[in-house]
Amino acid sequence: MTPCKVCLVHGSLGLSGKMAALRALGRLRAPSGLLGSRWLKLPQPVRGKQWQPDVEWTEQYAGAVMYPSPITEKWVPAPWNDKDPPVEKTVSNLTINFGPQHPAAHGVLRLVMELSGESVKRCDPHIGLLHRGTEKLIEYKTYLQALPYFDRLDYVSMMCNEQAYSLAVEKLLNIQPPPRAQWIRVLFGEITRILNHIMAVTCHALDIGAMTPFFWMFEEREKMFEFYERVSGARMHAAYVRPGGVHQDMPLGLMDDIYEFIKNFSIRVDEVEEMLTNNRIWKNRTVDIGVVSAEDALNYGFSGVMLRGSGIQWDLRKSQPYDVYDQVEFDVPIGSRGDCYDRYLCRVEEMRQSMRIILQCLNKMPEGEIKVDDAKVSPPKRSEMKRSMESLIHHFKLYTEGYQVPPGATYTAIEAPKGEFGVYLVSDGSSRPYRCKIKAPGFAHLAGLDKMSQGHMLADVVAIIGTQDIVFGEVDR
């Protein structure tokens, strides 16, 4: 006798398997030997697909889980209202504080930034944390005693600030320094420009993440500080360029050492360019970042590299030459897109042009005096003071009382490494300035930070601050 399907199921499955099989078969016919011709009635299967858990087991999870029911009973939904439109809930932007202790803040910059996710919507610079009242202090000093304040404004390009002030005083006095003094000024003005651009380019790279150029170029910076020290006695705050000329003549052998330095320095610039200019990461972080159109650059009052990077060829050394810049040959690099990458290329090329000017200064340096031949302005020489009592008295009165400047006002600007550094000087006929207003290029650049950083990522703001080359000594004054 052939076994039936039920017997096969019984023999091969467990209890659950048997029940499933019986549910699947529903009603089935038993073998004639067992029950005759009657039908075997089996329970009907449950048609629902959802798992039905044990009722007792689910009772423990009924009601509130996190809070007891007396609390949750008070939470009733608001009554349905289909007359008033639903209130649209907006997600507010995140407001964060950037600085002033941030390492990329370049001093004491504080930014209040509004972010939508990672994107910058507003960038509000808060300045004044390095305000020292320089312009007011100058009103209480003689014209010569006011000079060291200018070293401490843009404390990365010191002699350029002195040069602007000295030119303003000379314009009021209607005097002109001798040719040798003018050539020395231009020589050290271009050394200062290289000093500034080394700091700007390498610190910009350091902020973005390239550490190596910073250490390479600061070794060269130390060598140039040695030139400062040999000519003035100070490595940074030189007080060397003074109204009427320069303080002292250059020591013997200095021009030869400057020539040797410049001859080897171009190799260092090539090394930095080799590392950065075609670097894929560097270009990703600088190309199309902080773009400024030519129109916006003019409207914001940008100057220097920030203006030339947007394609406007404006350099005061060419358009309004001062000292002997009309006697040297050099080119003015300009950008085309106005982004961080163009400004970086302009600064590197300006270093090369400064080397070119320095070599011309060394070749064309004339002999002669380094101070104007006017005893009312320039002090007597040391050799004269050792022989003449009148010279000693004159020296003493000149440094304590100062010299009278005729009444008048002048605005004198130079092409500092960061842009147009201007001095508005008002004289009332006494030995002290009536008013000295300083126009710093970094102030206008910082005002454009909001415009430049809108729509960029938070990390790109650091790159934009770096390309603006901001020093807070001149911004806050």
Image (tube, rainbow, N blue to C red):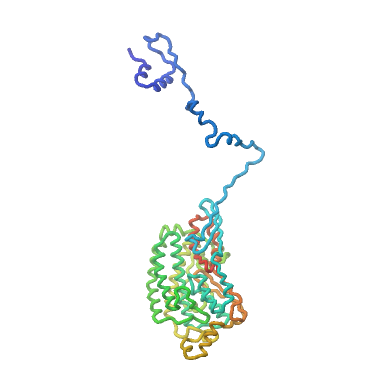
Q: Residue 405, position in %: x, y?
A: 59, 82
Question: Which residue is located at x 45 percent, y 82 percent?
Answer: 249
Residue 49 appears anywhere in the view: no
Q: Quadrant of residue 219?
A: bottom left
Q: Quadrant of the C terminus?
A: bottom right
Q: Residue at x 41, y 13 (%)?
A: 29
In this rendering, position of residue 216 left or right of residue 320: left
277 or 395: nearer the eye? 395
Using residue 270 as the reference point, say whether residue 429 is left or right of it. right
Q: In what quadrant of the picture does the N terminus appear?
A: top left
Which of the pair 382/190 is nearer the observer? 382
Task: Locate residue 460, reporting x and y percent.
Answer: 49, 57
The image quarter in which residue 111 lies: bottom right
The x, y position of residue 130, in whole percent, is 54, 66
> Looking at the image, which residue is at 40% across and 8% down?
36
Is the residue 8 above or below the residue 245 in the image? above
Q: Residue at x 38, y 10 (%)?
A: 34
Residue 326, percent from left and from top: 50, 78
Residue 378 visible in this rendered orientation of the protein: yes
Instruction: Give the answer, above or below, for where 304 lies relative to 116.
Output: below
Residue 406 lies, with reference to residue 110, above or below; the image says: below
